[in-house]
Amino acid sequence: MAGRSMEADARDEGGTAPTSGREEEILDAALRVFLRFGYRKASMDEVARGASLSRQGLYLHFSSKQALFHATIERMIGQVRTATLTALEREDADLTQRLADAMAALHGSAAGADRDVVGELLAAAADVSGPLLDRLHDNVVDRVAALLRDSGVEDAWRDAGLNAVDLAEHLYLITTAVAQSGGDLTRQYQALHTAARIATRGRSG
């Protein structure tokens, strides 16, 4: 949108306002810990060490592990949303690549993490940040569907009884499945690219 920053747009869709540099360091450390241990096994002590803080210093910023996890997921969702929409809006790539790159961006920092850990984090995130995840889903599906309509891809699927929203929902679900499959990142991207090729029927425009 003209006249709007990505940060303002992200806040409207459930993202976060910019945090202080110190809190960003804490949230980066927390994300690494959560991706390594999962929500249940992650400890505030581990996050404090990762952020070069004392336990007491960490609690000055975040009063509980749940509060820290919520802030971490909130920030990550904002980053994922920005990266995903940026990929969709690129003008130097064909449609299939834009979709594949956007799907890969939805993995965010979880790409390559242990699939059991990712599954547990997604479940925990749904409990503490469900509305944010729902808004991310809705916003990305809306943008992908609009792109498929504008590019003419939707017309190619009418005879199969599918519309742009059906295709966008399918791509989103595939992205979630690939993110939880684990394995090599190159293979994951190849799977996403194949899904995008199928959805677009090889359309390059």
Image (spheres, rainbow, N blue to C red):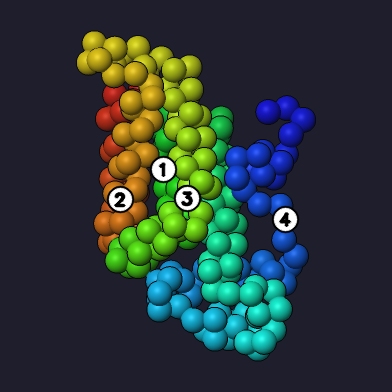
Disc nearer the start of the sequence (3/1): 1
The Cα atoms of the two marked residues, 2 and 1, are separated by: 10 Å
Residue 6, can we see it?
Answer: no
* First reached walking from the N terminus: tag 4 or tag 2: 4
Report the Cα–Cα distance between label 1 and label 4: 25 Å
Quarter containing the C terminus: top left
Foreground label between 1 and 4: 4
Q: Amino acid at mark 3?
A: Gly
- Residue 133 image point, x, y percent: 48, 47
Residue 170 picture location, percent across and down: 31, 34
Work out whether 35 lies above or below 47: above
User: Which residue is identified by label 2?
Assistant: 178
For marks 1 and 4, the one nearer the N-term is: 4
Image coords of residue 69 (percent x, y): 53, 66
Mark on residue 103?
1
Left or right: where 186 falls relative to 29? left
Q: Quadrant of residue 167?
A: top left
> Based on the displayed image, in which of its 4 quarters is residue 14 positioned?
top right
Check if mark 2's residue and mark 1's residue have beta carbons within 8 Å. Answer: yes
Residue 187 in the image: above or below residue 92: below
The residues tagged by marks 3 and 1 sit, at their Cα atoms, a distance apart of 20 Å
Q: Earlier in the sequence, mark 3 or mark 2?
A: 3
Tag 3 residue: 130
Amino acid beneath label 4: Pro
